[in-house]
Amino acid sequence: MTKKVIKNHAALIKHLTAWAGTFLLLFFLRNQPQLIEKVYAQKLYPLVAVINRWIMHFFSFSVGDLLYFTGLAYLLYQSIQLLLNYRNPGLYAKQISGFLLKTIWIFYLSWGLNYYRQPLAKLLKLSKTNYTATQLISVTDSLIKKANHLQIQLTQNDTLAVEVPYSINHILNLTVLGYQKIEPYIHVKYMVPCLKVSLFSKQISYMQTSGYFNPFTGEAQVNKFYPKVFSPSIASHEVAHQLGFAPENEANFLGYLAATHHPDLYFKYAGTIDALYYFLIELKRYDSSIFKQDLKKINRGILKNYRQAQQFQKQYRFPINFSKTYDAYLKLNKQKSGIRSYNEMVSLVIAYYYQKK
């Protein structure tokens, strides 16, 4: 056996050991919520997050989007080289594997370990995470009344869709005010805001994405093509991710709290109709007849706003279903319900409703 072969074998063993060690460490950490909460979520992550956002807020454009583009271009180049050199693929396979391994480490250290922290319900002492049918119907009815009231306040006509007069950048600048209002309740301060319009808004529209958080740079991105009436709620959701709340149901819930406690009526409206949408989905699953009755109670203007979102989805429909990939990603990161976890914010809203009652 030549020295070169021995060296290659040793390098392969070292590489496989690094991958195995990474998976074993993550498997251990995902079952240590108290350790993650105390050491990472409460101490290390807030420091990393503020530093990231402080650096990124100097750039008016999304650095994270350019980072994604560069990373994907690199992987594409290495993959092409791998195919062209299929008889001797070792070098390119190693480079691809090494790049992915480093990406995984950076992802979890910079933000991803928040998936393994203690549940938000426990942190906020929301004990009633399992709700009854009566509670679901009651809170849905309350949300309908609030949404109708806000829609009338904003349009003076129950048949008109609400149109937000602000620019998308103005909405992003206002988002922090909602978190300032709920800071005494969630015990987390949002410092150094960093929200931006995605450079790839058109592209992510075809992925049916309204906004997203970049874990590598700490930036929150909003899709400028998504119906603007929902932008305050979308931005508030992404800020929750910036604060270290990774699960989608928790980000949805905190986004709802921040938007509905915001001093601006357009934020209150966006947060209310967004939550109402998820409640209606759950109500339809429970009893379609009650769902149909409640649908008749909703002002036509609100339904027109919902149709704007539906029209967006139809306009940017794409043959590839990207939601399946995201569903797998969520399940991999301890969200058993996958993409349906967005709807699980319903239990948190109901628990909060009865906690404050």
Image (cartoon, rainbow, N blue to C red):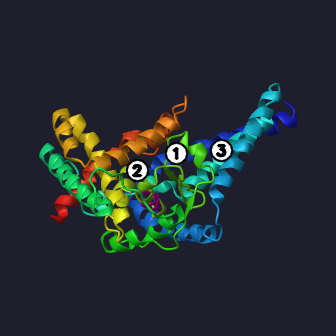
| Tag shown at residue 24 | 1
**Residue 21 in view of the camera:** no
Q: Which residues are magenta?
A: 235-239
Q: Earlier in the sequence, mark 2 or mark 1?
A: 1
Looking at the picture, which amino acid does disc 1 mark?
Leu
237 falls in the magenta region: yes
Q: Nearer the viewer, mark 3 or mark 1?
A: 3
54 falls in the magenta region: no
Give the percent coordinates (x, y) of residue 273.
31, 53
Residue named by callout 3? 100
Residue named by callout 2? 248
Q: How far apart, in angstroms, are the residues tagged by discs 2 and 1?
A: 25 Å
Q: How far apart, in angstroms, are the residues tagged by discs 2 and 3?
A: 24 Å
For disc 1, the neighbor class at 10 Å (few under 14, some 14 to 19, many from 20) is few
Position of 119 relative to 5 (above/below): below
Residue for point 34% across, 66% down: 265
